[in-house]
Image (tube, helix red, strand yellow):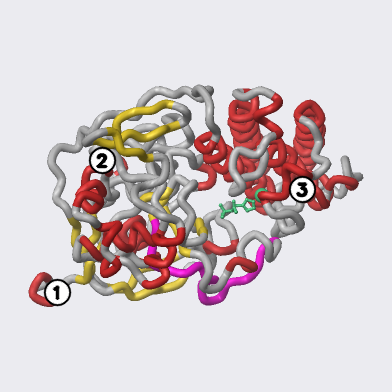
Amino acid sequence: IQQLDTERLRQHVADQLVRARERTALLTDAVDEHDLVRQHSRLMSPLVWDLAHVGSQEELWLVRDVGGREPVRQDIDELYDAFRHARADRPALPLLGPAEARGYVRQVRDKALDVLAASALSGHRLVDHGFAFGMIAQHEQQHDETMLATHQLRSGPPVLHAPDPPAASAGPLPAEVLIPGGVFTMGTSTEPWALDNERPAHQVHVPAFFLDTTPVTNGRYLEFIDAGGYAEPRWWSQEGWAHRQRADLSAPRFWRRDGSGWLRTRFGVVEPVPPDEPVVHVCYHEAEAYARWAGRRLPTEAEWEKAARHDPATGRSRRYPWGDTDPGPDRANLGQRHLRPAPVGAYPRGASPLGVHQLIGDVWEWTSTDFHGYPGFSVFPYPEYSQVFFGGEYKVLRGGSFGTDQVACRGTFRNWDFPIRRQIFAGFRTARDARPEELA
Ligand code: AVJ
Ligand code: FE
Protein backbone atom coordinates (compact mmCIF):
# COMPACT_ATOMS: atom_id res chain seq x y z
CA ILE A 1 0.00 0.00 0.00
CA GLN A 2 2.89 2.37 0.86
CA GLN A 3 4.34 1.48 -2.54
CA LEU A 4 1.10 2.33 -4.30
CA ASP A 5 0.80 5.67 -2.51
CA THR A 6 4.34 6.61 -3.49
CA GLU A 7 3.51 5.75 -7.09
CA ARG A 8 0.46 7.98 -7.02
CA LEU A 9 2.39 10.82 -5.43
CA ARG A 10 5.08 10.43 -8.09
CA GLN A 11 2.43 10.70 -10.79
CA HIS A 12 0.93 13.77 -9.12
CA VAL A 13 4.35 15.41 -8.95
CA ALA A 14 5.04 14.63 -12.60
CA ASP A 15 1.64 16.07 -13.58
CA GLN A 16 2.40 19.33 -11.79
CA LEU A 17 5.80 19.65 -13.46
CA VAL A 18 4.28 18.91 -16.88
CA ARG A 19 1.45 21.41 -16.38
CA ALA A 20 3.90 24.12 -15.40
CA ARG A 21 6.02 23.44 -18.48
CA GLU A 22 2.97 23.56 -20.77
CA ARG A 23 2.15 26.99 -19.38
CA THR A 24 5.74 28.18 -19.79
CA ALA A 25 5.73 26.95 -23.39
CA LEU A 26 2.49 28.76 -24.13
CA LEU A 27 3.84 32.04 -22.79
CA THR A 28 7.21 31.78 -24.54
CA ASP A 29 6.04 30.29 -27.85
CA ALA A 30 3.41 33.02 -28.29
CA VAL A 31 5.98 35.66 -29.26
CA ASP A 32 8.86 35.81 -31.75
CA GLU A 33 12.55 35.67 -30.86
CA HIS A 34 12.92 39.42 -30.73
CA ASP A 35 10.08 39.70 -28.21
CA LEU A 36 11.66 36.93 -26.12
CA VAL A 37 14.97 38.70 -25.68
CA ARG A 38 13.86 42.31 -25.45
CA GLN A 39 13.02 44.40 -22.44
CA HIS A 40 9.29 45.11 -22.35
CA SER A 41 9.61 47.06 -19.12
CA ARG A 42 12.44 47.89 -16.74
CA LEU A 43 10.32 46.24 -14.06
CA MET A 44 10.56 42.87 -15.77
CA SER A 45 13.14 40.42 -17.04
CA PRO A 46 13.28 39.49 -20.71
CA LEU A 47 11.03 36.43 -21.13
CA VAL A 48 14.03 34.36 -22.14
CA TRP A 49 15.63 35.09 -18.74
CA ASP A 50 12.57 33.74 -16.89
CA LEU A 51 12.65 30.66 -19.11
CA ALA A 52 16.26 29.73 -18.36
CA HIS A 53 15.95 30.82 -14.70
CA VAL A 54 13.16 28.28 -14.26
CA GLY A 55 15.53 25.63 -15.62
CA SER A 56 18.38 26.85 -13.47
CA GLN A 57 16.36 26.56 -10.23
CA GLU A 58 15.20 23.11 -11.28
CA GLU A 59 18.80 22.10 -11.93
CA LEU A 60 20.00 23.44 -8.55
CA TRP A 61 17.28 21.81 -6.45
CA LEU A 62 16.20 18.67 -8.27
CA VAL A 63 19.17 17.60 -10.37
CA ARG A 64 22.04 18.60 -8.08
CA ASP A 65 20.61 18.76 -4.55
CA VAL A 66 17.93 16.04 -4.47
CA GLY A 67 19.45 13.92 -7.25
CA GLY A 68 23.13 14.40 -6.39
CA ARG A 69 23.80 14.43 -10.14
CA GLU A 70 26.49 16.25 -12.08
CA PRO A 71 25.66 19.87 -13.00
CA VAL A 72 24.14 20.45 -16.43
CA ARG A 73 25.47 24.00 -16.85
CA GLN A 74 27.35 25.22 -13.79
CA ASP A 75 28.78 28.05 -15.89
CA ILE A 76 25.43 29.84 -16.07
CA ASP A 77 24.42 29.68 -12.40
CA GLU A 78 25.47 33.27 -11.88
CA LEU A 79 23.49 34.66 -14.85
CA TYR A 80 20.23 33.26 -13.52
CA ASP A 81 20.74 34.10 -9.87
CA ALA A 82 17.99 36.65 -9.22
CA PHE A 83 20.07 38.28 -6.48
CA ARG A 84 23.08 38.94 -8.70
CA HIS A 85 21.44 41.06 -11.37
CA ALA A 86 18.50 43.47 -11.13
CA ARG A 87 15.68 42.84 -13.60
CA ALA A 88 16.46 46.04 -15.50
CA ASP A 89 20.05 44.87 -16.13
CA ARG A 90 19.22 41.38 -17.36
CA PRO A 91 18.75 42.16 -21.07
CA ALA A 92 22.43 43.21 -21.25
CA LEU A 93 23.73 39.89 -19.86
CA PRO A 94 25.18 37.19 -22.12
CA LEU A 95 22.00 35.12 -21.69
CA LEU A 96 21.22 31.87 -23.43
CA GLY A 97 19.34 32.61 -26.64
CA PRO A 98 15.80 31.30 -27.17
CA ALA A 99 16.84 28.00 -28.79
CA GLU A 100 19.61 27.40 -26.24
CA ALA A 101 17.30 28.20 -23.34
CA ARG A 102 14.65 25.82 -24.65
CA GLY A 103 17.25 23.09 -25.06
CA TYR A 104 18.59 23.74 -21.56
CA VAL A 105 15.23 23.51 -19.78
CA ARG A 106 14.42 20.31 -21.70
CA GLN A 107 17.71 18.73 -20.69
CA VAL A 108 17.21 19.69 -17.05
CA ARG A 109 13.64 18.40 -17.08
CA ASP A 110 14.70 15.01 -18.44
CA LYS A 111 17.18 14.65 -15.59
CA ALA A 112 14.70 15.92 -13.01
CA LEU A 113 12.16 13.30 -14.11
CA ASP A 114 14.89 10.69 -13.78
CA VAL A 115 15.56 11.89 -10.25
CA LEU A 116 11.82 11.74 -9.54
CA ALA A 117 11.63 8.14 -10.77
CA ALA A 118 14.47 7.17 -8.42
CA SER A 119 13.29 9.09 -5.37
CA ALA A 120 11.47 7.43 -2.47
CA LEU A 121 9.78 10.80 -1.87
CA SER A 122 10.38 10.26 1.83
CA GLY A 123 13.26 9.86 4.26
CA HIS A 124 14.38 13.44 4.47
CA ARG A 125 12.58 16.71 4.75
CA LEU A 126 13.49 18.06 1.32
CA VAL A 127 11.74 15.21 -0.50
CA ASP A 128 9.05 14.14 2.02
CA HIS A 129 5.68 14.22 0.25
CA GLY A 130 7.55 15.40 -2.85
CA PHE A 131 8.23 18.84 -1.32
CA ALA A 132 11.25 19.88 -3.44
CA PHE A 133 9.42 18.87 -6.61
CA GLY A 134 6.34 20.76 -5.49
CA MET A 135 8.46 23.79 -4.68
CA ILE A 136 9.93 23.72 -8.19
CA ALA A 137 6.51 23.31 -9.83
CA GLN A 138 5.30 26.31 -7.81
CA HIS A 139 8.40 28.28 -8.71
CA GLU A 140 7.84 27.72 -12.42
CA GLN A 141 4.16 28.67 -12.13
CA GLN A 142 5.12 31.82 -10.20
CA HIS A 143 7.40 32.81 -13.04
CA ASP A 144 4.60 31.99 -15.46
CA GLU A 145 2.50 34.60 -13.67
CA THR A 146 5.43 37.02 -13.84
CA MET A 147 5.75 36.29 -17.57
CA LEU A 148 2.03 36.95 -17.96
CA ALA A 149 2.61 40.36 -16.36
CA THR A 150 5.42 40.92 -18.87
CA HIS A 151 2.96 40.10 -21.66
CA GLN A 152 0.57 42.69 -20.24
CA LEU A 153 3.39 45.28 -20.46
CA ARG A 154 4.29 44.30 -24.00
CA SER A 155 3.04 46.55 -26.78
CA GLY A 156 1.76 45.30 -30.11
CA PRO A 157 -1.11 43.17 -31.35
CA PRO A 158 -2.54 40.50 -29.03
CA VAL A 159 -0.86 37.09 -29.00
CA LEU A 160 -2.57 35.47 -26.00
CA HIS A 161 -6.17 34.34 -26.20
CA ALA A 162 -8.54 32.67 -23.75
CA PRO A 163 -12.29 32.35 -23.28
CA ASP A 164 -14.06 34.83 -21.01
CA PRO A 165 -14.72 33.81 -17.41
CA PRO A 166 -18.27 32.92 -16.31
CA ALA A 167 -20.87 35.67 -15.86
CA ALA A 168 -22.19 36.66 -12.44
CA SER A 169 -24.67 34.09 -11.14
CA ALA A 170 -24.78 34.64 -7.39
CA GLY A 171 -27.75 36.99 -7.40
CA PRO A 172 -27.73 40.16 -5.29
CA LEU A 173 -25.03 40.04 -2.62
CA PRO A 174 -24.81 42.04 0.60
CA ALA A 175 -22.04 44.67 0.52
CA GLU A 176 -20.23 43.25 3.53
CA VAL A 177 -20.06 40.20 5.77
CA LEU A 178 -19.54 40.08 9.54
CA ILE A 179 -16.66 37.86 10.59
CA PRO A 180 -17.21 37.13 14.30
CA GLY A 181 -14.38 37.79 16.75
CA GLY A 182 -12.24 35.06 18.28
CA VAL A 183 -9.22 32.90 17.85
CA PHE A 184 -8.45 31.05 14.62
CA THR A 185 -5.56 28.98 13.29
CA MET A 186 -3.40 30.96 10.88
CA GLY A 187 -0.77 29.32 8.69
CA THR A 188 -0.15 25.59 8.44
CA SER A 189 2.11 22.87 9.73
CA THR A 190 0.49 20.10 7.69
CA GLU A 191 0.01 21.30 4.10
CA PRO A 192 2.76 19.28 2.37
CA TRP A 193 3.79 21.82 -0.26
CA ALA A 194 3.30 24.95 1.86
CA LEU A 195 6.38 27.17 1.67
CA ASP A 196 8.37 28.22 4.73
CA ASN A 197 6.62 31.59 5.14
CA GLU A 198 3.20 29.86 5.49
CA ARG A 199 4.46 27.92 8.53
CA PRO A 200 3.95 27.10 11.33
CA ALA A 201 0.24 26.97 12.24
CA HIS A 202 -0.40 29.35 15.13
CA GLN A 203 -3.37 30.79 16.98
CA VAL A 204 -4.36 34.40 16.29
CA HIS A 205 -7.12 36.36 17.95
CA VAL A 206 -9.01 38.44 15.39
CA PRO A 207 -11.65 40.83 16.76
CA ALA A 208 -15.01 40.97 14.96
CA PHE A 209 -14.86 42.90 11.71
CA PHE A 210 -16.77 43.44 8.50
CA LEU A 211 -15.24 42.49 5.16
CA ASP A 212 -16.43 43.37 1.65
CA THR A 213 -18.32 40.42 0.16
CA THR A 214 -16.33 40.79 -3.07
CA PRO A 215 -13.24 42.59 -4.31
CA VAL A 216 -13.77 46.28 -5.11
CA THR A 217 -15.02 46.62 -8.68
CA ASN A 218 -13.97 49.00 -11.45
CA GLY A 219 -17.38 50.65 -11.09
CA ARG A 220 -16.81 51.44 -7.42
CA TYR A 221 -13.25 52.50 -8.07
CA LEU A 222 -14.50 54.90 -10.75
CA GLU A 223 -16.64 56.61 -8.11
CA PHE A 224 -13.44 57.32 -6.19
CA ILE A 225 -11.82 58.74 -9.33
CA ASP A 226 -14.91 60.81 -10.16
CA ALA A 227 -15.04 62.13 -6.60
CA GLY A 228 -11.55 63.53 -7.12
CA GLY A 229 -9.90 60.86 -4.99
CA TYR A 230 -6.57 61.22 -6.78
CA ALA A 231 -6.52 64.97 -6.07
CA GLU A 232 -7.23 64.84 -2.34
CA PRO A 233 -4.24 64.26 -0.09
CA ARG A 234 -6.52 63.55 2.89
CA TRP A 235 -7.36 60.06 1.55
CA TRP A 236 -3.73 59.09 1.13
CA SER A 237 -1.01 58.22 3.60
CA GLN A 238 1.92 60.60 3.57
CA GLU A 239 4.05 58.05 1.75
CA GLY A 240 1.17 57.26 -0.59
CA TRP A 241 0.57 60.90 -1.48
CA ALA A 242 4.28 61.47 -2.12
CA HIS A 243 4.21 58.51 -4.49
CA ARG A 244 0.94 59.67 -6.12
CA GLN A 245 2.69 62.99 -6.86
CA ARG A 246 6.01 61.57 -7.97
CA ALA A 247 4.50 58.94 -10.26
CA ASP A 248 1.65 61.20 -11.39
CA LEU A 249 -1.00 58.57 -10.70
CA SER A 250 -4.55 59.35 -11.84
CA ALA A 251 -6.15 55.94 -12.57
CA PRO A 252 -5.22 52.25 -12.46
CA ARG A 253 -2.37 51.25 -14.72
CA PHE A 254 -3.38 50.49 -18.34
CA TRP A 255 -6.46 52.76 -18.15
CA ARG A 256 -6.99 55.79 -20.30
CA ARG A 257 -9.76 58.34 -20.56
CA ASP A 258 -11.92 58.26 -23.67
CA GLY A 259 -14.36 61.16 -23.78
CA SER A 260 -16.63 60.67 -20.81
CA GLY A 261 -15.64 57.01 -20.30
CA TRP A 262 -12.57 54.91 -19.74
CA LEU A 263 -10.73 52.37 -21.86
CA ARG A 264 -8.16 49.85 -20.74
CA THR A 265 -5.62 47.77 -22.59
CA ARG A 266 -5.54 44.09 -21.68
CA PHE A 267 -2.96 41.88 -23.40
CA GLY A 268 -3.06 44.11 -26.46
CA VAL A 269 -6.87 44.45 -26.63
CA VAL A 270 -8.37 47.88 -26.00
CA GLU A 271 -11.82 47.72 -24.42
CA PRO A 272 -14.18 49.76 -22.26
CA VAL A 273 -13.48 49.28 -18.54
CA PRO A 274 -16.03 46.66 -17.36
CA PRO A 275 -17.82 48.03 -14.28
CA ASP A 276 -18.57 44.70 -12.56
CA GLU A 277 -15.05 43.30 -12.70
CA PRO A 278 -12.64 43.61 -9.76
CA VAL A 279 -10.27 46.52 -10.25
CA VAL A 280 -6.75 45.35 -11.10
CA HIS A 281 -3.34 47.01 -11.54
CA VAL A 282 -3.62 49.32 -8.56
CA CYS A 283 -0.82 49.76 -6.06
CA TYR A 284 -1.12 49.50 -2.29
CA HIS A 285 -1.29 53.27 -1.93
CA GLU A 286 -4.25 53.53 -4.29
CA ALA A 287 -6.04 50.70 -2.48
CA GLU A 288 -5.45 52.39 0.85
CA ALA A 289 -6.66 55.78 -0.44
CA TYR A 290 -9.83 54.23 -1.87
CA ALA A 291 -10.53 52.51 1.44
CA ARG A 292 -10.11 55.70 3.44
CA TRP A 293 -12.33 57.61 1.00
CA ALA A 294 -14.98 54.89 1.44
CA GLY A 295 -14.77 55.31 5.25
CA ARG A 296 -13.10 51.94 5.57
CA ARG A 297 -9.63 50.37 5.67
CA LEU A 298 -7.73 47.48 4.12
CA PRO A 299 -7.99 44.14 5.94
CA THR A 300 -5.01 42.86 7.87
CA GLU A 301 -3.46 39.66 6.60
CA ALA A 302 -4.88 37.76 9.61
CA GLU A 303 -8.38 39.10 8.87
CA TRP A 304 -8.10 38.01 5.27
CA GLU A 305 -6.96 34.52 6.18
CA LYS A 306 -9.61 34.11 8.85
CA ALA A 307 -12.30 35.07 6.32
CA ALA A 308 -10.83 32.61 3.83
CA ARG A 309 -10.21 29.61 6.10
CA HIS A 310 -12.05 29.71 9.40
CA ASP A 311 -15.04 27.40 9.54
CA PRO A 312 -17.39 28.72 12.24
CA ALA A 313 -19.20 25.38 12.44
CA THR A 314 -16.14 23.39 13.51
CA GLY A 315 -13.66 26.09 14.56
CA ARG A 316 -11.17 24.53 12.17
CA SER A 317 -9.12 26.32 9.51
CA ARG A 318 -9.59 24.81 6.06
CA ARG A 319 -7.45 24.87 2.94
CA TYR A 320 -9.83 27.06 0.92
CA PRO A 321 -12.98 29.14 1.53
CA TRP A 322 -15.19 26.28 0.25
CA GLY A 323 -13.44 23.50 2.16
CA ASP A 324 -10.44 21.24 1.70
CA THR A 325 -10.86 20.20 -1.94
CA ASP A 326 -8.58 21.61 -4.61
CA PRO A 327 -9.94 24.49 -6.70
CA GLY A 328 -11.84 23.47 -9.82
CA PRO A 329 -12.99 25.76 -12.64
CA ASP A 330 -16.33 26.20 -10.85
CA ARG A 331 -14.72 27.45 -7.62
CA ALA A 332 -12.22 30.10 -8.65
CA ASN A 333 -10.71 31.99 -11.58
CA LEU A 334 -7.16 30.66 -11.51
CA GLY A 335 -4.54 29.22 -13.84
CA GLN A 336 -4.70 31.64 -16.78
CA ARG A 337 -7.82 29.81 -18.00
CA HIS A 338 -9.25 33.29 -18.48
CA LEU A 339 -7.08 36.31 -19.08
CA ARG A 340 -9.10 38.67 -16.90
CA PRO A 341 -10.80 38.81 -13.51
CA ALA A 342 -14.37 37.49 -13.51
CA PRO A 343 -17.27 39.78 -12.64
CA VAL A 344 -18.19 39.77 -8.96
CA GLY A 345 -20.69 37.02 -8.18
CA ALA A 346 -19.27 34.70 -10.85
CA TYR A 347 -18.17 31.99 -8.40
CA PRO A 348 -20.95 31.26 -5.88
CA ARG A 349 -19.47 27.77 -5.37
CA GLY A 350 -16.23 29.37 -4.23
CA ALA A 351 -17.80 31.35 -1.39
CA SER A 352 -16.87 30.87 2.26
CA PRO A 353 -19.39 29.53 4.82
CA LEU A 354 -20.12 33.11 5.92
CA GLY A 355 -20.66 34.19 2.32
CA VAL A 356 -17.44 35.96 1.31
CA HIS A 357 -16.89 35.57 -2.44
CA GLN A 358 -13.87 35.36 -4.73
CA LEU A 359 -11.19 35.34 -2.06
CA ILE A 360 -9.28 32.88 -4.23
CA GLY A 361 -8.44 33.82 -7.81
CA ASP A 362 -9.38 36.86 -9.94
CA VAL A 363 -7.05 39.41 -8.31
CA TRP A 364 -4.36 39.35 -5.63
CA GLU A 365 -5.65 41.36 -2.69
CA TRP A 366 -3.52 43.93 -0.90
CA THR A 367 -3.55 43.63 2.89
CA SER A 368 -2.33 46.24 5.36
CA THR A 369 0.26 43.85 6.81
CA ASP A 370 4.03 44.05 6.30
CA PHE A 371 5.68 40.79 5.24
CA HIS A 372 7.21 39.06 8.27
CA GLY A 373 7.85 35.50 9.41
CA TYR A 374 5.19 33.95 11.63
CA PRO A 375 6.06 33.20 15.26
CA GLY A 376 8.24 30.08 15.12
CA PHE A 377 9.29 30.70 11.49
CA SER A 378 12.23 28.68 10.31
CA VAL A 379 13.98 29.00 6.95
CA PHE A 380 13.29 26.10 4.61
CA PRO A 381 15.01 25.30 2.39
CA TYR A 382 16.75 28.60 1.58
CA PRO A 383 16.66 32.14 3.04
CA GLU A 384 16.31 33.81 -0.35
CA TYR A 385 12.80 32.49 -0.90
CA SER A 386 11.19 34.45 1.95
CA GLN A 387 13.38 35.45 4.83
CA VAL A 388 15.49 38.06 3.07
CA PHE A 389 12.25 39.95 2.25
CA PHE A 390 10.99 40.12 5.85
CA GLY A 391 10.78 43.62 7.31
CA GLY A 392 8.79 46.75 6.62
CA GLU A 393 9.39 47.15 2.90
CA TYR A 394 6.86 44.76 1.45
CA LYS A 395 3.09 44.42 1.85
CA VAL A 396 1.41 41.02 1.86
CA LEU A 397 -1.03 40.13 -0.91
CA ARG A 398 -3.43 37.20 -0.64
CA GLY A 399 -5.66 34.93 -2.67
CA GLY A 400 -4.03 34.61 -6.08
CA SER A 401 -5.18 36.07 -9.38
CA PHE A 402 -6.49 34.79 -12.71
CA GLY A 403 -2.79 34.46 -13.60
CA THR A 404 -1.92 32.23 -10.61
CA ASP A 405 -1.87 28.47 -10.89
CA GLN A 406 -3.63 26.45 -8.20
CA VAL A 407 -0.39 24.68 -7.27
CA ALA A 408 0.82 28.08 -6.03
CA CYS A 409 -2.45 29.18 -4.44
CA ARG A 410 -4.00 28.17 -1.10
CA GLY A 411 -5.75 29.81 1.82
CA THR A 412 -2.35 30.03 3.51
CA PHE A 413 -0.30 31.21 0.50
CA ARG A 414 1.50 34.53 0.97
CA ASN A 415 2.64 36.85 -1.78
CA TRP A 416 4.40 40.17 -1.20
CA ASP A 417 5.50 43.21 -3.15
CA PHE A 418 6.51 46.84 -2.78
CA PRO A 419 3.52 49.09 -2.04
CA ILE A 420 4.13 51.06 -5.27
CA ARG A 421 3.88 48.09 -7.64
CA ARG A 422 1.04 48.02 -10.18
CA GLN A 423 2.14 45.64 -12.91
CA ILE A 424 1.12 42.62 -10.83
CA PHE A 425 -2.49 41.42 -11.01
CA ALA A 426 -3.45 43.13 -7.77
CA GLY A 427 -6.73 44.56 -6.54
CA PHE A 428 -8.21 44.66 -3.05
CA ARG A 429 -11.28 44.56 -0.85
CA THR A 430 -11.98 46.74 2.18
CA ALA A 431 -12.87 46.10 5.82
CA ARG A 432 -14.02 47.92 8.93
CA ASP A 433 -14.11 47.26 12.68
CA ALA A 434 -17.42 46.00 14.04
CA ARG A 435 -19.05 48.34 16.55
CA PRO A 436 -20.14 46.78 19.87
CA GLU A 437 -23.84 47.43 19.13
CA GLU A 438 -23.49 45.49 15.86
CA LEU A 439 -22.52 42.35 17.77
CA ALA A 440 -25.42 42.28 20.21
C1 AVJ B 1 6.51 35.21 -4.12
C2 AVJ B 1 5.95 36.18 -6.22
C3 AVJ B 1 7.13 37.48 -4.57
O1 AVJ B 1 8.40 36.43 -7.95
O2 AVJ B 1 9.57 37.49 -6.48
C4 AVJ B 1 10.11 33.50 -7.84
C5 AVJ B 1 8.30 34.25 -6.19
N1 AVJ B 1 10.70 33.60 -5.77
N2 AVJ B 1 11.40 33.15 -7.74
C6 AVJ B 1 8.81 36.58 -6.81
C7 AVJ B 1 9.67 33.79 -6.59
C8 AVJ B 1 11.77 33.22 -6.50
C9 AVJ B 1 8.32 35.67 -5.69
N3 AVJ B 1 6.99 36.12 -5.17
FE1 FE C 1 12.68 32.67 -9.34
Magenta segment: 366-381
Which amino acid type is shown beneath numbered disc 3?
Answer: Tyr
Whole-Å distance between the Cαs marked 3 and 1?
A: 52 Å
Whether residue 434 sits left or right of residue 263 in the image: it is left
Residues 69 and 291: in front is 291
User: In this picture, is 168 found above or below 222?
Assistant: above
Sequence order check, earlier mark of 3 and 1: 3
Q: Secondary structure at mark 2?
A: loop
| Residue at x-position 42% and y-position 26% | 269
Percent position of residue 221, x then y:
26, 49
Number of residues whose C-alpha sits closer than 10 Å to that of mark 2, classed few (under 14), some (14–19) or many (20 or more): many
Whether residue 289 sits left or right of residue 399 in the image: it is left
The residue under label 1 is: 435
Q: Nearer the viewer, mark 3 or mark 2?
A: 3
The residue under label 2 is: 344
Percent position of residue 92, x then y:
77, 44
Residues 73 and 50: in front is 50
Whole-Å distance between the Cαs marked 1 and 2?
A: 27 Å
Residue 439 in sight: yes
